[in-house]
Amino acid sequence: MRRIIPFILSAVIFAAAFFLLFCKEEGFHQRHWAFPLESQGSLTVDPNPASCGSCHLQQFGSWKSTLHSRAIGPGFLWQLPRIGKHGSENCMNCHSPNPETKNLLLTRLGWGEVSDSAWKSGSEENGVQCASCHLRKGKVYGPFPKDGNKNRIFQNSNIPHEGFIPQKEFEESEFCKNCHQSPETAKQVNGKFLMDTYGQWRRSEFAKSNVQCQNCHMPDRKHEWKGISDPEMVKQGVQTSLQVLAKEEGAEIISELKNSGVGHLFPSYSVPKVYLEVWTEFVTGERKKISEKTLGWMLDLELQKEIFDTRLSPGESVLLRESLSKEEFSKLKRVEFIVTVDPKEYYKRMFQDNWNYKDTFLEDTKPWVLPYLKAALAEANSAKYELVRLEWRR
């Protein structure tokens, strides 16, 4: 009998481990963002964001100005004929998640058939819209009220969509993970995922302090999702300084940029670049750039090779130090520290390279590809902006 007990104990432990690994109940995040999303089926409400906006005016107004609402833009559309139906469907998981809007896009490309549904033509151009996050199988989901009252009645047949199902997960960073984090099986460049924003946050002090993505990108639940393309948002996340220190042998110019409030690497992806420049101006009228640095993850056009990675972790700083001789300092009139952000640097390179070889595109794809590519290139070229200009004068 004694010999049997260890065997039984081992069997129990094995069964428990099997249950934990394979029979554990699937969490809300996994169900809600199981790509590809399931069809909504028959709807009793209009899924168009403008319809939602008739009641949720503030959220709709904010959403209209976001990159989420423009996820189906020229920079996305021109690439679809070139990556094919399967590749396009994978990209649409995040850019146009609902199967109904996917089908409308595929139909425009000649890869699908128009279906009779509440999703009218044009819905696909709304990108990541209200239904993408809040609607599943005809039911509306959202966060608990801001007052924290979990005892309210959320189902009411007398209001549109009969109320909603509250879920605490709407205020967790993991809610954003599926579209802002490469899966574990995804391609890596020099051991790094192309999308690792969630992972960067997870490894930071922000995660340990329970500061979620939504705290910064959806403050007070505003549906704005501001990021690297918004100067004011970026200014809230970094600190800059400029010092000119006189010394016996001349002077030292110290410029600093610190990632003081961004909860992930700055910048996060390989697309944006941040340029730091220090300029001097002398009483003679001569103006000279004496120091420069690029912050970002620079990859080749094929996303195969890392050229450099100078991104700043949360709390990390970059210093630009330059020394002037006594004679140079005596003639120094002004110093400028200029920080410029190019949110779409990689896209500019990639779009321009494709435009340069546009004559090699398949003839039957040119009517679709070329107008969108031209618009995408113009959009990318206009995205650059000056973030900070600090000045020292004698």
Image (cartoon, rainbow, N blue to C red):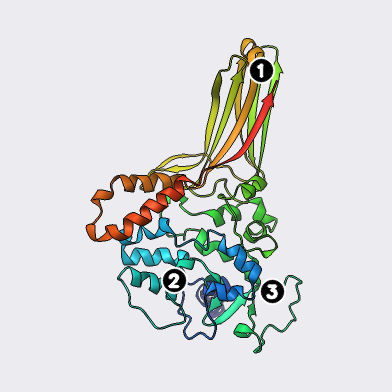
Mark 3 belongs to which amino acid? Phe
Q: Quick check: can you spot residue 282?
A: yes
Q: Is residue 305 above or below residue 57?
A: above
| Whole-number angstrom distance, CA of label 1 to CA of label 3 | 57 Å
| Residue 195, disc | none
Q: Which residue is mark 2?
A: 122
CA gap, disc 2 to disc 3? Answer: 31 Å
User: Which labelled disc corresponds to residue 251?
Assistant: 1
Q: Residue at x 25, y 49 (%)?
A: 359
Which residue: 38% across, 47% down? 350
Density class for disc 1 (Cα within 10 Å; few <14, some 14-19, many ≥20) is some
From the top left corner, tell me how far across and down residue 117 is, in percent.
43, 82
Mark 3 lies on a secondary structure that is: loop
Question: Which quadrant of the rendered structure holds the N terminus?
Answer: bottom right
Residue 215, horizontal then vertical, whole percent? 67, 59
Residue type at mark 2 is Gly
Specify the amino acid type for callout 1: Ala
In three-dimensional space, the C-alpha distance between marks 2 and 1, rounded to whole angstroms, equals 61 Å
Q: Which residue is labeled 3 in the image?
A: 144
Q: Secondary structure at mark 2?
A: loop
Q: Position of residue 370 (x, y in %)?
A: 32, 54
Residue at point 63% right, 50% down? 233
